[in-house]
Image (spheres, grey):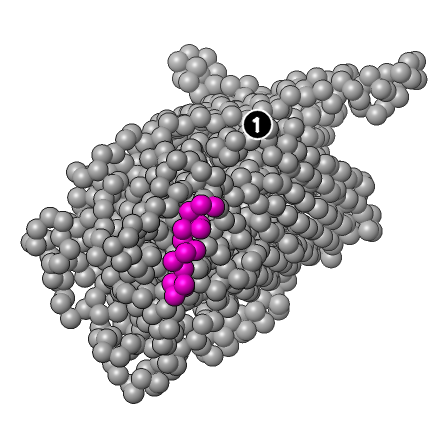
Amino acid sequence: MMSRRSWLYAVVLLMFWVPVAAQSTTGTIQGTVRDNQDAVVPGAAVAVRNVQTNAVRSLTTDPAGFYRFLNMPVGEYELTVDLAGFGKHVRSGITLAMNQDAVVNVGIQPASISENVEVRADAPLLNTTTPEVGVRFDTTRIAELPVSGASFRDVFAVALSAPGVSQLGSGQTGFASGTNFSSNGMRVRSNNFMIDGQDSNDPSVTGRQQPINNTDIIQEVRLITNQFAAEFGRAAGSVVAAATKSGTNRFRGSAFWFHNDENLNARSNLDKRAGRTEAPFRDENQYGGTLGGPIVRDRTFFFGSYQRWTDRQLGSGFTLSGAPTEQGRSVLQSIATGRPQVQALLEYVPAGTPNGKTASFTIGGQQFNVPLGDLTGSSSVVFNNDQAMARVDHSLTPGQTLVGRYLLGRTPESSGTGQVTPPGLTTVNTSNQHAVNTWLNSVIGQHLSNEFRVAWSHLGTNTGAQDPSSEAIPSLEISELGMTGFNAAASRTAPGLAVNLPQFRFNDLYQFQNNLTWVRGGHLMKVGFDVRYQYVKSFFFPTIRGLLRYSTLQTFVNDVAEAANINKPLPGGQEVNYYRWWDQYYFVQDEWRVRPSLTLNLGVRYELPGNNIQSLIELNEGILGANNNNDVFRLTPVPKTDRNNVQPRLGFNWSPRTAAGGLAGLITGGDRFVLRGGYARTHDYAFLNIALNIVSSFPYVAAINRSNLSNAFVQLQSTPAGVPAGTNPNLLTRTVVTEDFRAPYADQFSMEMQRQLGQNLVARIGYVGTFGKDLLQTLDGNPRQPFCGNPCTTGPRVDTTRGVIRTRANTAESWYHSLQTGIEKRMSGGLSAAVHYTWSRYTDTASEIFNPSSGEVAVAQDSFDLAADKGRSAYDRPHRLTGKLRLGAAVHAQPGRIDRQDPRRLAVSVVLYRAEWRAIHAAQRHRPDRRPGGHRRVGWQRDPAEPEHGPGPREHDHPGAHRGGRIDPVHPAVRHAEPDVRGRAGR
C-alpha cells in the first residue's frame, strides 16, 4: 500500500512540473479551408473567439489546408479565416458541445471576387469524426423539457429519451441510486456518471452519487451508449457526462419556482383503498436561482446557484386486512399474560376496522375467535433539501484556464417515508453530498494540450427509525394475518423495525486525473490516467434484532416460530466496517484522419479496479485470533486483484464526398452522409455491496437460523453473541465470492448510417449489439441433492459438512441485438424536435445479482446447469418509442428591445417570445410473458426449509437510493401497479 501511495504522490508531483480533464469538459473545432476551385488552402490564418468570454485562439492551416483547435471550452464561437489575396471569411453562431469534434469547413473567395464574407451557421449535425453511439442534451433541452425520473426532477433523467435506453416497469426494483435505466443490453448498474469530468458514482449500489435537481446549472448532458472512446470506461452500459455552466462577460441569471399540491394530483390506488374521496394533502415547493458574470472582464468569471426543496404531504400506506379489531384485541388481551409476543402485537398494531373476517386459536382445549379488520396507515412526510453550486473560471494566460467548482447537496430532514402500516415504522433519513473539482486546461503550442484534474467527493447517509421504540422487538411476521415482509419497503406490513435498519454510510473519493493531447499530421493522439482512492465507513448489520416468522395465529400464540433468524457478532468482530482501496485507469487513443472522408479511431484502455474485499482481511484476522486461530473462522476464498482488464477500441467514420446528383447524390446528399461503426470492450465495476454481504455472514457474523423454535420470542432475543454452544460453525450460513471473482465485461458492436436532410435536420438508422460475459450472478453454492421426493425438504447437500452457501459468481451471460432509428431537428423557426424508435431483443441467464422484480428469483434454478435459465431479460423492451418537442412563437424584433416607432412592441414581443409548448413522451412494450419452469426464473420457489436465497435479510442493497435529494429506505421499494392487501380479505 505504501509503495503504491508513494508512486501516486510522485506522479502528482511530476504533473505540477508540466505546464498544465480528457476532453471531458471541452471540445475541438476543426475543419478544412478550400478556395473557390475546391483546392485546399495552406498557411491561412484561422482564429476562433469565444463570444461569451472574448477569449481568442489562433493558428495557421497545415499543408493539407486543415486546422484543429484543441481543448476549447464549450460555448458559442466565431471563426475567422484570413489570407493575403483572399477575402476575409467570418463565421458566427458555432455552438461547441462537450467532447464534440465540431467540423467547420470553410470556403474562401479571392479578394477580386469578394472582400469579406460573413456567415451565421452552426456546425453541421453530422458526426464525421467518431464511431460513438449517443445523444447530446444542450442547456435549452435540459432546462425546458420535463425531466421527471422517478417522481422527482433529475437532470440525468434526460437519458430516458435516448435510443437504446429502457426504463423500469411496474414491479421492478431500482437498484442504482437516482434514475434507473438499462442501456443497450446491460444492467441498471452498468452506467458511469460524471460531472465536469469528476467521478460521481455511488460505490455501494452504483448510480449517480451527487443529486442535481436544478436544471439551470447544467450546460450540457452527453450520453454515450455504445462505442466509447478509450478515455471512457468504468461501466459497460453507458457514460453519462454532465457539464456545469460557467460565467461570461455578461451578467446572466434565472429564478424558478415549481409548486405541487393536492389540487394538482389525483388519488393513488392506495388512497382509493383507504376510502379517500380526494387526494391527500400535499404542499411541495422547489425554488431557487442562478447568477453568473465577470469578476475581471475577459479573464475571471463566476457562476453560482442555490435551490431549496421542501415537501409536506399526508400519505396512505398499504392495507393490512388482518389487524385484530377492538373486540379481537380484548380476546388477545385475555391470554396475553406470560406471552410477551402477544403483548408486543397489542402494543405495536392498532385496532382494525371490522371486515367480517376472523382467525382462531385453541388453548387448553378452548377455542378463541379473534375478529379481524382493515388497517391502513397514514404518515406525515416532511422533506427539506438544499442544493448549491459555485464555480470560478480564471484565464491564467491565453492558453491556460484554471477552473474550480463546488457542489453541495444537503438533506437535514426527511421523515415519514417507508413503511406506513402499522404506524410507527416510518424512517428518518439524512444525507450530505459534497463535490470539489479543480482542473487546469493548458494549450502548449499549436499541437499539444493538457488537462489535469484533482477532485474530492463525499457522501454521508443515515437511515433510522422515526420511533426508536420500534427497535425494541424483532421483526414479527404472521402470514395468516397478512403481516409480512422483513426488509424496508412501503409494502411491508409486519410490526417491528425492518431487519435492514438502521444503517449509515460515509464515502470519500479522491481523484487524480491527467490527459495529454498531441496532434501530428492526421493523428490526434491522447494519453491519460485516472487514479482514485476510495474510503468507506459503513454500519450495516441486518437482522441484529432478529426475525420471527409464524404461519398462523395459533403458532404465534403458542410462540412456535416457523423461522427464527438472528445475526450475532463473532468475538473479535465489529459492527462498523471500514473499506479502503485504489482504482487505476489508463488509456491511449488515436483519432487518425486517414483522408478527409475517412477517420479511424484506435485505442486501448487498461483498468485496474481495487479489491474492496481485501479490506475484510484485517478484520478477519482479529476474529481468527479471538477464536484460537481455528481455521474454520478464516475468510475463504479471497479473490486476487483483477489485473487483466484490457479493453481494445476500434472504430471508423466514413463521410464520402460524392456528386450531388444521381443515385449516389440522392443517398449521400453530396457531403451529407456518414457511415460509422466499430467494436469496443468495456468492463463493469464490482460494487461494494457485495463485500457488505460477505461481512454480514459467517465468518464475521453468526447467522443463526432455527426452525420450529419454541418460546421463540424470548429465546431469540436472549441468543448470546458468537457461535451457539453445540453448533458446528461449518453449518452457519455464508455469503462468498468465487476465487476468480472479477469485473464483468461486454463486447459492443455497432454499424450506423446518418444522413443530414437540411441545415437543421438529421436522420439515423443502425444496428447496435452488446454481448455480456462474466456477469454477476447468485448461485446456491451448496444445493440439496434432488432425489428425496417432491417437495424436497430433507435431501442432503452436496457438501454435507457445510450449510447454506450463497455464492456470488461471474457465471451469467447476456445477448442484445437492436435496430435503432431516429430523426432530430435542431432549433430553428421556433421548433426543435426528436423522435427515436428502438427494436431490440435482450436475453440473459440472469438479470441481476439480486431479485430484479417481484416474483422473480435471482438464484439459478440449477447450479450445475446455468444455461437452463436463459430467457428474455428482466430489462427486455422489444419496442420503445420516445419523442421530444419544443414549439415556440417568435417575433422579428428581439424580446426586450423597444421599437421607437411603437413602444408597445416591447410587451408584445416578450409575450410572443415566451409562448412555448414543450413535451416529452416515452412508450415501451415490456418483455413477453415468461412462464415458470422451462427456461426462466419467474415463479421459482425456494426450498421452504432454507433461508431466503434472494436479497434476504443479509443480502440487501445498502444504504438507500438517493431520489434526487431524497433518500428512499434500503433499498428502493418495488414499484407496484396495484396496491396489495395483506391477509385474508381480497385474496
* 777 left or right, relative to 441: left
Task: Please report the residue visible at 33 percent of the width from the left and 35 percent of the height from the top.
Answer: 987
State which region is magenta. 326-340
Quadrant in the rendering for residue 588? bottom left
Residue 538 versus residue 767: which sits nearer the camera?
Answer: 538
Residue 829 visible in the snapshot: yes
Residue 126 in magenta stretch: no
User: What amino acid type is highlighted by mark number 1?
Assistant: Thr
* 151 left or right, relative to 599: right
Task: Please report the residue visible at 65 percent of the width from the left and 43 percent of the height from the top.
Answer: 311
* Residue 318, image x, y percentages: 46, 41
Quadrant in the rendering for residue 286? top right
Residue 556 versus residue 846: which sits nearer the camera?
Answer: 556
Position of 419 relative to 533 (above/below): above
Task: Please report the residue visible at 29 percent of the width from the left and 56 percent of the height from the top.
Answer: 363
Residue 40 visible in the snapshot: no
Residue 330 in magenta stretch: yes
* 959 left or right, relative to 632: right
Q: Residues within 10 Å of mark 1 (few under 14, many from 20)?
A: few
Task: Please report the residue visible at 49 percent of the width from the left and 63 percent of the height from the top.
Answer: 471
Position of 871 relative to 230 (above/below): above
* Residue 405, image x, y percentages: 67, 55
Position of 129 relative to 489 (above/below): above
* Residue 433, image x, y percentages: 61, 57
| Residue, disc 1 | 277
Give the structural element (helix, strand or loop) at label 1. loop
Q: Residue furthest bottom?
A: 628
